[in-house]
Amino acid sequence: MYKKLLPLVAATCGFFATAAHADQTNGWFVDGSAGTAHYKATVDGLSGTDSNTAFILNAGWRDQGLIGFEAGYTNLGSLSSTDGYGDRAKLKADGWTFGLDGHFNFNDNWYMSARTGGFQWKLKATLSVNDSYLGSATYRGSEESLGWYGGLGTGYDFNKHWSVGANFDYYSMNKHGYDIGTHIFSVSAEYRF
């Protein structure tokens, strides 16, 4: 009789353990990431690549420990370049995100995450030109528009409040001859209320 009852007890305990763990990631959360942004840009037929430091801050809410929404701010860092004549160009990018967020546990502590949504981005460009005949001049411009972002990650839940992870995110910015794709490799920490 006990041999027949044992699988039923094990299945029931497994169900309650899974349900209890899913409750750990329910509700409101905040997270932050820091890492390296790798730019690949094409502007009016000219292209190039570079990298810099980036950070991401998010807040959101998840239901049943799985799918939820998030909103946040992403700073993609700045890039600068100079030539041998004293000319300097600088490009900065940042923006606001809003989208869906998922946190999927495949055992008690380890998880995979996914996120995607809209990215309201802004690019700021500065060009400083030194000319020995005409003097120096500085030109500034900016563009902004709605793009998109998506990302995947994995990490470890220490308890029902804290987790750490490693992530890959991609941000797309396209408008008027700009085609800039930026991917970020980052480490993150999350706190759940």
Image: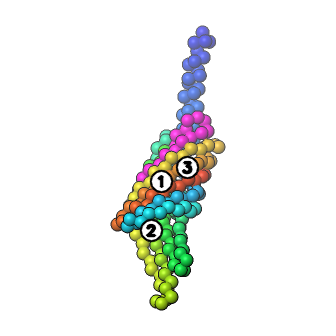
Gap between marks 1 and 3 measured at Cα: 10 Å
Secondary structure found at label 2: strand
The residue identified by callout 1 is 170
Q: Residues within 10 Å of mark 1 (few under 14, many from 20)?
A: some
Q: Residues within 10 Å of mark 2 (few under 14, many from 20)?
A: some
Q: Amino acid at mark 1?
A: Tyr
Q: In this rendered view, identify the residue nearer to me: 44 or 169.
A: 44
| Residue farthest along the left direction in this orientation | 176
Q: Is residue 144 above or below residue 21?
A: below
Q: Are marks 1 and 3 in contact (CB under 8 Å)?
A: no
Q: Residue at x 45, y 77 (%)?
A: 140
Gap between marks 3 and 2 measured at Cα: 23 Å
Q: Amino acid at mark 2?
A: Leu
Q: Residue at x 47, y 59 (%)?
A: 40
Q: Residues within 10 Å of mark 3 (few under 14, many from 20)?
A: many
Q: Are marks 2 and 1 in contact (CB under 8 Å)?
A: no
The residue identified by callout 3 is 167
Q: Which residues are magenta?
A: 103-118
Gap between marks 2 and 1 measured at Cα: 16 Å
Q: How is the image coloured?
A: rainbow
The answer to whether residue 60 of the structure is visible from this angle is no
Q: Residue at x 58, y 34 (%)?
A: 107
The residue identified by callout 2 is 123
